[in-house]
Amino acid sequence: MIPHGKEMKVFTGNSNPALAEAICKSLNLSLGKSVADSFADGECSISLSETVRGEDVFVVQSTCKPVNDHLMELLIMIDAMKRASAGRITAVIPYFGYARQDRKAKSRDPISAKLVANLITVAGADRVLTMDLHASQIQGFFDIPVDNLMGAPLFANHFISRFGKGNDDVMVVSPDVGSVSRARSFAHKLEMNMAIVDKRREKANHSEVMNIIGNVSGKTVILLDDMVDTAGSLCGAAKALMEIGGAKEIYACASHGVLSGPAVERIENSYIKELLLLDTIPYPEGKPRCGKISYLPVAPVFAEAIDRIYEEVSISSLFN
């Protein structure tokens, strides 16, 4: 039984309409009618073409490249729905941008993640649904409920079907010390051993591999990360695992394929045999397809979460 009696509607901006369509297909709904356009000077223009008064509204919008444009689309769409008297507005953000500056790492640094959280809240969102935040503490930056879904179970199911559980010839590897907790949980799901690539980051998007903690010699390796931006860290870790660690072959997986700059070319020329991504971000336009990159769909998971939020029942089981 639906306790609130509202109708559910799903809308999208321009960041990932294919994912929004797939979510609606899983929910047996039609995508809400709206237009996200821009004025001649680049200002975002939003127009809703159907009523949302009193409805339970979900806005699907990843804040991926161009990040600022897609973020403004999300904010203005939320504002439009708030002013049109929507009953409840959930910002469904499969990839939450501006998440990498989540603390003051040095003097006079901004905390961009907190600023964006404030913007989304002030715009009028009542709750947020996202996946694999770069730092889990970002949930605490919001003064509204945040549900942070996990992509690791999707990868776990894929690799269990491929290698089985508890395979001693396969190891999970964290590409850096900051991802150890995520990799440990993933290794536990697969019942496999874990190793760590320890590196020193010299500057943004550049890293120097220093050491491998664990024995990966002769092993098939699964590198796990939350995002792939320029792919420098991931490809550097793969190189170290092969040339220093003596790994047999390397698979990699990450929730968000940002794939900026030389990322696709680096992956194509790397030791990585296959990079598995979730389709929270579409493949970058204008770049040649890389045969090593494949995608797993997240629409069924988001559709299930949206349905449970709408029904006002627990979604905690989806976190596992």
Image (cartoon, grey):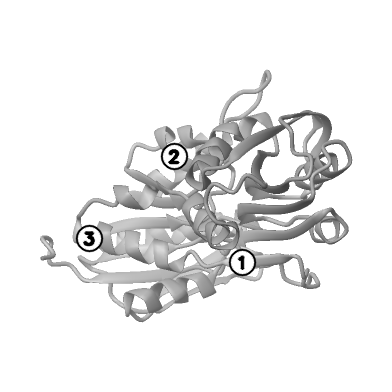
Badge 2 element: helix
Instruction: Tell me if residue 287 comes above or below residue 159 in the rendering.
Output: below
Q: Rounded to the nearest whole Å, what is the CA distance between mark 2 and mark 1?
A: 32 Å
Residue closest to the eye, 186 or 4: 186
According to the picture, the residue beneath numbered tag 2 turns out to be 118
Residue 43 percent across, percent down from the top left: 59, 62
Mark 2, other Cα within 10 Å: few <14 / some 14–19 / many ≥20: some
- Give the CA distance from mark 3 to mark 1: 35 Å
Q: Is residue 124 visible?
A: no
Instruction: Report the amino acid beneath label 2.
Output: Asn
Residue 245, x across and y down, in percent: 82, 37
Q: Which residue is mark 1?
A: 295
Residue 94 in the image: above or below residue 320: below
- First in sequence: mark 3 or mark 1? 3
Q: Which residue is mark 3?
A: 87
- Gap in Å between the C-alphas at discs 2 and 3? 20 Å
Residue contact between numbered discs 2 and 3, judged by CB atoms under 8 Å: no
